Image (cartoon, helix red, strand yellow):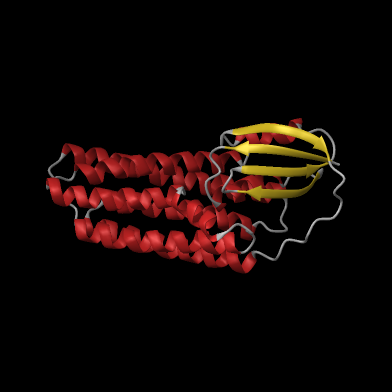
Amino acid sequence: MNKSTFTISQMDCPSEENLIRMKLSQFASIRHLDFDIPNRKLDIFHEDDISPINKALTDLNLGCQLDNSVESTKTHFEEEADQSKLLWTVLLINLAFFFIEMTTGIISKSMGLVADSLDMLADSFVYGISLFAVGGSLKRKKNIAKTAGWFQIILAIIGFFEIIRRFATGDSLPNFSTMIVVSIFALIANGLCLYLLQKSKSKEQAHMKASLIFTSNDIIINLGVIAAGTLVFVTETRYPDLIIGFIVFLLVLQGAIRILKLGK
């Protein structure tokens, strides 16, 4: 058996881990995956050549680099605990905040909240694909990934057109207080999801978990919307909200493309 170690520079949170697990599920030669998200490392215990596995990881465009591949004498791996209940928990949290942020974003005329709601939906897709495709065929997983990816791309494109329209017209200011309050709750929700996911399997100390949480893309997005809401109040213009909305839609589009690649 071989042990191959990868550095994955864009593996920021458990959603990337889920994407990697789904992508590698096609390889019967893989015996075990050992993720170290805080250090962005992945150890793969496998039989046969690492080249096709390396290519599959590279196709995800997560900044994957093979550090080394050595022989391993390890033959026993601890059975991973059933993650279904945990995945359902984070899926429902993300879905709930998708509806909350989408609704409040429309009411408050905030594109930042609308875009962030789609980011929550993107995470829901990843967890949902993992749940509903468990035990299913590789073809079924690919079909679900394609459907989810294209749906997300369509929503992101609609969002881009709405931002352009608002730049060109004289829409009223978004409600900055709603932006800030809802984003603070979304920040707490994302932190809770990441904490639960890491607590279930991580042996890292508490400060490492905190470090993980605050380097997550989801947390950065929430902080960005809070900052945009503050700037809307200070500048009395809608542009900070439109700018953060545009940036988040780009991230949503990037995530959708990654999901689509699982369907190839």
Q: Give coordinates of residue 23: x percent, y percent.
A: 66, 43
Disc tally is 0
Question: On the image, which quarter does residue 159 sit in?
Answer: top left
Q: Is residue 246 left or right of residue 177?
A: right
Q: Is residue 31 left or right of residue 240?
A: right
Location of residue 86 with respect to 256 vertically, above or below: below
The percent position of residue 230, horizontal first and vertical second, equals 21, 52
Specify whether residue 171 is in view.
no
| Quarter of the view holding residue 76 | bottom right
Where's residue 55, x and y in %? 68, 31
Nearer-the-camera pick, 190 or 3? 3
- Which quadrant would the N terminus be assigned to in this image? top right
Residue visible at 42% across and 41% down? 251
Locate the C terminus and report the quarter of the image it occupies: top right
Residue 170, can we see it? yes
Residue sitting at x 63%, y 48%: 36
Out of 138 and 98, give the one closest to the viewer.
98
